[in-house]
Amino acid sequence: MPFYEENPKDIKQADLVVAVPSYNEAESIGHTVEQCSKGIKQHFSYLSSVLINCDNHSTDKTRDTFFSAPVDVPRIYLSTQPGEIGKGSNLRNLFVKARDLQAKVVVVIEADIKNVSPHWIRNLAEPVLKGAGYVCPLYLRHKYEATLTSSLVYPLMRCLYGRRVRQPNVGDFGFTGRLLDSFLDSPLWTESVRMYGVDIWMTTVALNSRLPICQAVMGAPKIHRMKDPYAHLSVMFQQVVRTIFDQMSIYSNFWLQVKWSKPTSLFGTDSHEMETPLPVEVNVSQLHERFLQGFETYSGIWERVYDQTICPKIQEIRGLGLQHFSFPTQTWAKILFDTAKAYQSLGEGERVSLLDSLLPLYLGKVLSFVKKTERMSLQQAEEYIENECTVFEENKPYLAKIWE
């Protein structure tokens, strides 16, 4: 779809594009673009640069705040048409414009980050200038922050594509302009990609581009405005997981050849002192209750979809009770593999039901992770996750067998 554009300085070329996607972010976007501008000036003054706000037709003066912020870099404002929403829609407009600008490096920073700083721009852009194709940030996270990534996205993506990218769907990234055609020409552009699925979609396209991948150590947590982690869980879960499953079909010739994962290079390991992640509270009783509720609604789907050894194991987990709750990683990996395979042959309505049925099992896996790691340090919890990823990789032959 065509997009609305304001380019007051008539910028026609930029080596470095720093973009801030937004939807009604008037309260935060001014600070974000100011810090981005400082990062550009401090580290990349020798490059032609532009700041782009790729917006979702905001109604709260996001555009006005973007243009009035005290910055020293030319600005371009892009917006979707009225009624067209989703971060993916914003980013698609960005891809088109960045290609028109012949950008060599593109950095994307979310609008609502409270603690963004100039060195973040350096950490995401400099590896690209040194030859990286795609850069994922590595933020400091509490062990119970972003459990969808820790329990599902990271181990599954690592198992599939063979690269250890710890935060593949974090929302901020840097990438080479050479990837713009790959993004714009991707055969997959679904409702999920237009919304919450766009971050993992981009990383998957990059992983399959054969370009070098890098992780940038940010040395800090990523602090957003406060959000209820369960407010949009069902929608986000559906869109992220279905995007992964959709791309499994597209890239099966690649991932079926991958046997084991390899480390991913790090940038910025010695640049800043590490901060402390913010505390995260977990309601284990709520997780347990939602896990148990799944049996009432979804047992029939589980029996149809999963290997015959899985459902007895799930029933065994159900009987453990909260105090002794444990969800074996091998069982969880096979559940995801079976779900991914079943997803490919279903219609849209059945796919929604299938992924809805996976959600309570995911919450059970999160509960198990919390129980296993409650006395662990952050480093020990990370080592636990790494061991879980190894279990996924050890069981990949099962996925390859059922897939083919």
Image (cartoon, rainbow, N blue to C red):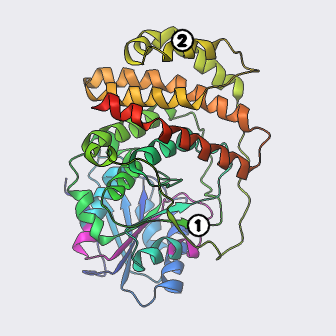
Q: Secondary structure at mark 2?
A: helix
Residue 278 bears which disc, if any? none
Report the residue at 50% width, 26% height from top.
Answer: 359
> How far across and how far down the image is residue 55, in percent?
37, 58
Report the residue at 42% width, 79% height from top.
Answer: 130
Report the residue at 26% width, 45% height from top.
Answer: 253
Image side of residue 238 versus residue 351, left or right: right
Residue 217 bears which disc, if any? 1
Give the label, 2 or 1, closer to the camera: 2
> How far across and how far down the image is residue 133, in percent?
37, 68
Number of numbered discs: 2
> How far across and how far down the image is residue 167, in percent?
52, 53
Q: Secondary structure at mark 1?
A: strand
- Quadrant housing residue 242: top left
Magenta extent: 97-121
- Quadrant housing residue 184: bottom left
Q: Does the magenta portion include 154?
A: no
Residue highlighted by disc 2? 312
Q: Amino acid at mark 2?
A: Pro
> How far across and how far down the image is residue 101, in percent?
26, 76
